[in-house]
Amino acid sequence: MPTLRLALCQVDPTVGDIAGNAELVRAWTRKAADAGAQLALFPELMLTGYPVEDLVFRRSFVAASRAALHRLAADLAADGLGDLPVLVGYLDADGPPQVSADAEPGKGARNAAALLHGGAVVATYFKHHLPNYGVFDEDRYFVSGDALTVVRIGGVDVALTICEDLWQAGGPFAVARHAGVGLVLNINGSPYELNKDDIRLPLVRRRAAEAGAAIAYVNMVGGQDELVYDGDSMIVDANGTLLARAPQFVEHLLVHDVDLPPAKEPVDGEQVADGMRIVRAKVSDILPPAPVGEVAVGGIIAPVADEAEVWQALVVGLRDYVNKNRFPSVVLGLSGGIDSAVVAALAVDALGPDRVVGVSLPSQHSSEHSRADAEELAKRTGLDFRIEPIQPMVDTFLANMSLAGVTVENLQARVRGVILMALSNQEGHLVLTTGNKSELAVGYSTLYGDSVGGYNPVKDVWKTLIWRLAKWRNADAERRGETPPIPENSIGKPPSAELSPGQLDSDSLPEYDVLDPILIGYVDGDLGREGLVASGHDPAIVDRVLRMVDTAEYKRRQSAPGTKISIKAFGRDRRLPITNRWREDG
């Protein structure tokens, strides 16, 4: 029985940085070769980054991707790595974009994979199943492939597939069984959602059974705008046994020796099965030598607690957004409350304290304990702490305009936003906004005030989860013998915007342990009023909450991007009209 040493290269590409991504492939292929690999895999659309969205429609971008692929093949050979087969995702096209006037049926942009060997592209595959739900719009961009590529490598028949091909029954994995392959390679750009790693392994096992073959699943890591990728690459044998699994949220080389059945079918000739053609190819007989000595064991990384997983996702999403967009630092308002405290701790974990500026912006309504809690957090984390009182500026407005009530509350929030944006303009910081998903859902924010900012790390985090994350982060610090970053008073005190005397969030909203389950059902679960009431929620509170959610769409449409961690984040996941008279109460 042949043995192939697989190297799954779980890396962090950047959208549009074709040259930089190609260099990543060269560097990690070198690591794979040094580990004795006989086959290396890189993620979906590795050369372009993923998702590329409307860059697909730029023919210059497609041409650059195709040229870079062939240049990469030659560069790998020049690096002395030509004997190692390398599977890499890239953007291809066999016709004009589907949206153009000269479009041709069945042709267009392709989400593609290429096997590089001996300085050349020896085989290609076009993604068959194109996802068109949630954050995915691949029917808008790509044309589906109609052939399964099977490549003979080291005496083993290996099928090439891409991401969604794994998530749908039938298609390439069913055809792989007809083709008699021993191994299916699946390259991915699979975004993170909480507990998605619990779904992947059973799914990969089902596809292994469907194909009757082992599966090597490689996923990217890193952040791309609102998306974050968690890696979680793995290898499963034909019986569904998990052989190796990579950690989440870090670049990683997963190297593992896999025993595979020898190829039986002839290399030449073309078959048809389940509506797909089977196209066979063979790499040169010159491969890196079979592994000798100790067997390579990739290891199996155990899953972590939900709070640890979410914290890592938020840190990686923020870090990559800041670094890939080349911001030198971030600035945020520190109120002493739980939301700004969590965002500050995330920012320090992501960037280091020297790249984080926290600004206390007290008004006449700011309590002494809030000011003290903000300063205490700064001491614990080491970030750059500043105090900019807002009351003199608010008083100037009030001396020139007759304002009262909630308008004065909003004025205070907007003055704070002006100060943060001024610091951003003056010093080059990216402004972080700190509104959680519960507040965004019901519109409990001031447009151009506390909502101001370029990125919101907790945009997809419900308020009740904010508290859980704060407690977990402090406990994790204590376990490691470090100072907990978040003051206990910020966690324990009732939440308040402190824009009027004695104000509490509960003056305007139901308690969060009542509010969040309704919001989760309505926003994430698409439940209507009847479904929410049937779930046990008070009808009057349901009606009140749904009215707030429905009338706040215009605010959410203008909110900053933020890391997606749930099944339905505000933004790409949930697309509702702003002008909309439908209400769940009829």
Image (cartoon, rainbow, N blue to C red):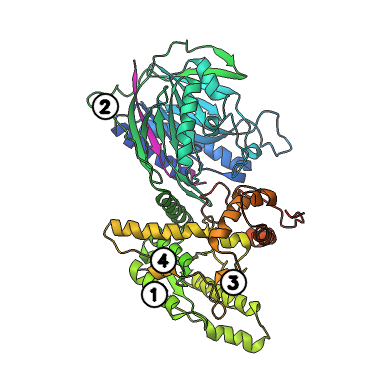
Residue labelled with disc 2: 295
Residue labelled with disc 4: 356
Disc 3 or 2, which lies upstream in sequence? 2
Q: Is residue 103 magenta?
A: no
451, 92: nearer the viewer: 451
Q: Residue at x 47, y 79 (%)?
A: 367
Q: Is residue 71 visible?
A: no
Q: Which residues are magenta?
A: 1-18
211, 477: nearer the viewer: 477
In the displayed structure image, the side of residue 89 where residue 396 appears, left or right? right
Q: Residue at x 55, y 24 (%)?
A: 172
Image spot of residue 410 (x, y percent) = 61, 75
Residue labelled with disc 1: 375
Label 1 is placed on what type of residue?
Glu
Q: Residue at x 38, y 66 (%)?
A: 486
Disc 1 versus disc 3: distance between alpha carbons? 27 Å
What is the residue that sits farthest to the left in this orientation? 293
Disc 2 versus disc 4: distance between alpha carbons? 45 Å
Q: Is residue 482 visible?
A: yes
